[in-house]
Image (tube, rainbow, N blue to C red):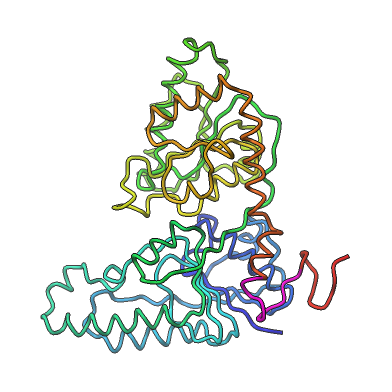
Amino acid sequence: MKTVGIYQSGRLGQNSSDNSYSMAKIAEILSENCRVEIVHHEENLDAEAWQKWLGVNLSRVDFRYVPALEMEQGSANFRKSLREEADFGREISEPYEIFWGFGNCPPIFCHSKMGIYWTEFPSMSFDEFYGHDLPEWGQMGYLSRFFGVRRHRVSWRGRLASYQHILCPSRFTKQWCWRKWQVTPTVFPQVLRPGFTVGEKTHSIMTYGEFSAEKHERQEVLIGIFQDFYEQKIAKLGLDSEWKLIVAGTCGESEADMAFVEKLRRKAYGYPIEFLVNPGLETVQKLLGEATFFWSALGYESSEELYPERMDACGMRVLEAQAAGAIPMVYQAGAMPEVVRHAMNGLLWCTARELVDMFCAVLLENRLLPIIATGAVKNAEIYQDTAFRQNLRNRLRGMVEISDVPGTEEGEKSE
């Protein structure tokens, strides 16, 4: 039985990134025929609560805690830092025949026979990662910086070259992996979390994201667009006045995040706009199943060229909405054109005026709604568990046996 190590450099908690479910699902699938360990840096991780929150079965998976390595950016002691990086990678990856890393920073050194790395979006470039843009680096002498860059370049190339496969969820991310890391990954879509199904539709629009001014979800823009629709379009066009907007999302405990929520509430006062802060997964699934539309303004009015990290790089929330039969109306940036085919399984917009005009148009021509909604549900099926298993089987062909159905061990055949 082969040994597999799965490692995520970031948090595994309930506020972790969108790729946590895909990582956990890979661990669940591989544990059917391999000995799998999830390597993490959270000393007090509640593994049982984490897998319950994700809705996966990790009873066959072990968890291994390793203290994180604190990198000293801009350090002049190059040899020491490079040796520490290599030793840290060896400690984490060497015990496994297959090592699968997840993260948005450049990967650790891989000392496994087979290294795979999956990134949602490359958050740091070469200069940012090694602190070349810090004041401390600029204060060093010319020769120190010259030879430092050369040594860092060796470390950088060694990290990326130690993996046989680098994967990403979209062509958008693939483009930025080349621009930031000078690597060309293979597009490997994420898996859609189960439980998002079509319910009895109501006159509701839902937006779901994070309540944070720093995340550029732009809920205030969507509230303003809905207010414009409610004030000016309903009576003028003779549309149903029962429409409401549901603004849901996660919110941290910082004063800035909570103040941002209160600011949105004040802006929405007096309109049929509901707020749900930190709703449970079942609540989100139920509301999406009842919603006719899903709105997103992630990255709106931000330059994709200057701030690509503000865009949606994989579109999992949009796919969840599609699976629930909610027609996505999303800002045309990032990976959205890959997920949404305009007027076939959703609608793409570029300006606030375009969104409200498009919304009114589809309500007036309501025969299009079931057609687009059906296309949305069919598109989401591409990202379901069965398709994900097939993609994983193709990726690991010759290395690991992947069962056709959950729970089928190697050598067994599904009936």
Q: Is residue 261 left or right of residue 245?
A: left
Identify which residue is drawn at 43% across, 65% down. Answer: 104
Magenta region, mostly helix, strand or loop? loop
Q: Position of residue 125 (x, y in %)?
A: 32, 67
Give the quadrant of the C terminus: bottom right
Is residue 181 visible in this depiction of the protein? yes
Q: Quadrant of residue 86?
A: bottom left
Which residue occupies the foreground of this view, 70 or 146? 146
Above or below, comparing residue 26 to residue 279 in the picture: below
Q: Is residue 354 left or right of residue 277?
A: left
Identify which residue is drawn at 14% across, 72% down. Answer: 138
Which residue occupies the foreground of this view, 66 or 5? 5
Q: Is residue 399 magenta?
A: yes
Q: Position of residue 35 (x, y in %)?
A: 68, 79
Above or below, comparing residue 403 to residue 144 in the picture: above
Q: Which residues are magenta?
A: 394-403
Is residue 42 visible in this depiction of the protein? no
Q: Is residue 182 magenta?
A: no
Q: Quadrant of residue 206?
A: top right
Above or below, comparing residue 228 to residue 220 in the picture: above
Q: Position of residue 184 (x, y in %)?
A: 43, 69
Q: Position of residue 156 (x, y in %)?
A: 34, 79
Give the quadrant of the N terminus: bottom right
Which residue occupies the foreground of this view, 60 or 116? 116
